[in-house]
């Protein structure tokens, strides 16, 4: 049996189950815009899986969740190496489903509005195709912007921004670091660090550096940041837009002048 077709028309899971039910031996080749994967079968059992730099169960999970691309089953060929042992197709599919749910929940947490620091991956493959919305999203990832910041800049709702981010992460074009803070910025209670205490002294050389970089607003923010006020309250006291204060707060925190109380 040699079959080929589009994954949009036949899911990878369905193709795998057909091969298993027919107890076929061969290699299922799956080609996507993100790379090429292989699943090797012997008498309907999966013995090997690979996808880019992933192998074994991890590769199987990624391949079974592919929803775009092409597939081809090459009959009576197989990979000599074995990296999946003593597990049935049903068990593998069940494992993949559970793993996918866990990954989705983890991704939802990473994409929460409090996730602060975003970065593009250092190596972006020229083979990956992105659309205009994804390109605009990538262009907005800088200066520690959160998913909420990016959605506001793009003029889209946060759920739409999350969906774009999920696609970009699956394409390995973005990475998300740990958030700087445990809450959304307006709810964070900032407190000055020892460095800030020194810099607020007009007689200290750091005071001029602080003033030149952040202006009077930066000085006033640090004065209000006594560990008793939320950022939202400080914003009201200063009478400025929340977005402006959020950027100021993040910058002061990165420079070591503020921390979360």
Image (cartoon, rainbow, N blue to C red):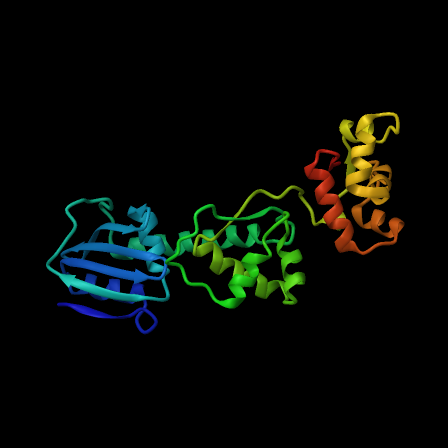
Q: Nearer the viewer, residue 208 or 168?
A: 208
Q: Nearer the viewer, residue 29 or 144?
A: 144
Counting from the top left corner in percent of width and height, residue 186 is at 76, 50
Quadrant of the frame with the N terminus:
bottom left
Q: Nearer the viewer, residue 151 or 100?
A: 151
Counting from the top left corner in percent of width and height, residue 223 is at 86, 37
At x 29% / y 61%, what residue is drawn?
31
Is 191 situated left or right of 34 in this image? right
List the single residue furthest toward the bottom. 9
Q: Is residue 6 above or below residue 122?
A: below
Is 193 situated left or right of 88 in this image? right
Is 146 situated left or right of 80 in this image? right
At x 60% / y 57%, what residue is drawn?
140
At x 78% / y 54%, what residue is drawn?
242
Q: How many numbered marks are there?
A: 0
Quadrant of the rendered image containing residue 197: top right
Quadrant of the rendered image containing residue 30: bottom left
Counting from the top left corner in percent of width and height, residue 250 is at 71, 44
Quadrant of the rendered image containing residue 241: bottom right
List the single residue furthest toward the left. 76
Is 34 situated left or right of 39 in this image? right
Counting from the top left corner in percent of width and height, residue 150 is at 63, 58
At x 61% / y 50%, what residue is drawn?
142
Q: Nearer the viewer, residue 247 or 148?
A: 247
Quadrant of the frame with the C terminus:
top right
């Amino acid at each position: 049996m040699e079959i080929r077709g589009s994954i949009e028309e036949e899911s990878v899971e369905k193709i795998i189950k057909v091969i298993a039910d027919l107890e076929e031996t061969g290699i299922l080749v799956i080609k996507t815009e993100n790379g090429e994967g292989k699943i090797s079968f012997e008498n309907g059992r999966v013995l090997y899986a690979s996808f880019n730099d992933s192998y074994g169960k991890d590769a199987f999970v990624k391949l079974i969740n592919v929803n775009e691309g092409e597939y081809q089953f090459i009959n009576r060929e197989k990979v000599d190496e074995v990296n999946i042992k003593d597990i049935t197709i049903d068990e593998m599919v069940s494992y993949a489903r559970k793993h996918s749910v866990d990954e989705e929940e983890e991704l939802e947490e990473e994409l929460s509005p409090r996730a602060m620091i975003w970065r593009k991956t250092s190596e972006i493959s020229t083979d990956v195709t992105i659309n205009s919305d994804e390109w605009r999203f990538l262009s907005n990832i800088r200066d520690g912007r959160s998913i909420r910041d990016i959605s506001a800049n793009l003029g889209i709702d946060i759920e739409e921004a999350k969906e774009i981010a999920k696609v970009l992460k699956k394409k390995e074009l973005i990475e998300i670091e740990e958030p700087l803070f445990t809450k959304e910025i307006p709810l964070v209670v900032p407190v000055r660090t020892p460095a800030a205490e020194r810099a607020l002294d007009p007689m200290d050389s750091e005071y001029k550096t602080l003033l030149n970089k952040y202006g009077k607003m930066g000085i006033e923010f640090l004065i209000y940041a006594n560990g008793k006020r939320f950022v939202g309250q400080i914003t009201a006291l200063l009478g400025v837009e929340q977005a402006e204060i959020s950027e100021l707060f993040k910058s002061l925190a990165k420079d070591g002048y503020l921390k979360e109380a």
